[in-house]
Image (spheres, rainbow, N blue to C red):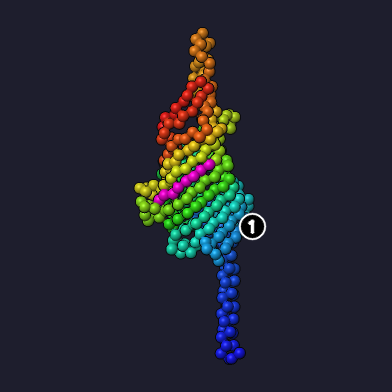
Amino acid sequence: ASPRTSKTRRITLWTVGILLCALGLLRVVIGFLLSPQALVDRIEAQMNARVEIGSAEISLFRLPCLIRLHDVRIGERDEASNNAEKLANRPAMERTLLSAKAMKLEGSPWALLSRKLDVADLVIDEAGADIRVRESGTINITKLFKQPAIVAGKPNPKKKFEAIVGDPAAGAGMASEEEPPVSIDEVPFAASVKSMVFNGARINAVLKKKGTLIDISGLRFELSDLDIDPNNLAAHNSGKVRIAGNVRVSMPEKDLEYAHMAILGEGSIRPFDPVTKALNPLVQAKLTLQDPSEITFLPSLAKINDRLEALKRVGINIGDKLGTSIQFADQTSVDIEYRDGVLRTLTPLLAKAQKIDVEMEP
């Protein structure tokens, strides 16, 4: 070979070697930056929560990029998360509020450089949520998505401390239970999510006023075409939703079941209020009740039965008891709206009691 050819070959080999070393170094650096510890540190710097991640895998050298997380748990913030302690040195999490067995994310991490979250596909398996609904309608997990007061042992300059007026239990700079909702101003980037799916999720929600438990199991929740831009909520603040699962409403303290239903639903969502910019979802959807779905105890029918029994005792008999349950025919549909923390029906919901037909007006 000529000297010129040998020199060109050496330059090519050196170039390829340098590129391979650079890619190997890049992979090591990215692996460190996306290790469970590094991910937890970054998430806890943005969320008022304690976070645990069992393991993480990443594939950046493909399009779209792929990230897998396993055994994700989120709970109330504590000293360990305030001080960014190493995961191996932390005490056990006292109470898990949100969890997932596995998460798979496909998207473009490079979009974050232009302050945009671009997700092609997000799948969350065996998710769980432990929710408490206060009398005011606010829920306990809202505070998890606020800015933390302390990050890595130091006051967070991004956190706005406000004295709680009229709350003697809250000191200066302390947050009361009734925190304001998350604002779009606290969302650091625009978001575009093509598809997000929760598989086999379970939600336990307790209404604190009466101790009513709403248990949703076997939940499949799909959010698609989500488009949010903090700078233009009027045009970018929408998504589509689909839901399927089993709902049971009960009062455990009295060993009483109010209802059990198998539901399917499809509709639209507007996550943020465009006027106040607060996280205040507006959901409009059509729900379909599948067999078996029934209200197993309705207080109003129970009261009617008590009156009939009282009349019978004084010699007035106008018929048998009506029963206390209401059955829904298979594939019964109703239009619903969730607005300002209140669920409403927009069309009549037809059902059948033991002796009478019942129409529940919106």
Q: Which residues are magenta?
A: 237-244
Tally of numbered tags = 1
Q: Is residue 73 visible?
A: no
Q: Residue furthest top?
A: 315
Residue found at x 44% / y 29%: 360
State the residue in front, 322 or 172.
Answer: 322
Q: Which is the main secondary structure of the residues drawn in magenta?
A: strand
> In the image, 157: left or right of 71?
left
- Image coords of residue 105 (percent x, y): 54, 56
State the residue in front, 266 or 111.
Answer: 266
Q: Is residue 265 visible?
A: yes
Q: Can residue 29 be found in the magenta stretch?
A: no
Residue found at x 57% / y 47%: 199
- List the residue tagged with mark 1: 88
- Image coords of residue 294 (percent x, y): 53, 30
Q: Residue furthest front?
A: 1
State the residue in front, 19 or 151.
Answer: 19
- Disc 1 on helix, strand or loop? helix
> In the image, 34: left or right of 224?
right
The C terminus lies in quadrant: top left
Q: Can residue 240 be found in the magenta stretch?
A: yes
The N terminus lies in quadrant: bottom right
- Image coords of residue 121 (percent x, y): 52, 55
Residue found at x 57% / y 29%: 256
Residue type beneath disc 1: Ala
Query: Does 361 appear above or below 266?
Result: above
Residue found at x 50% / y 26%: 352
Q: Residue furthest bottom?
A: 3
- Image coords of residue 245 (percent x, y): 55, 40
The 10 Å Cα crowd at callout 1, few under 14, some 14 to 19, many 20 or more, is few
State the residue in front, 58 or 210.
Answer: 58
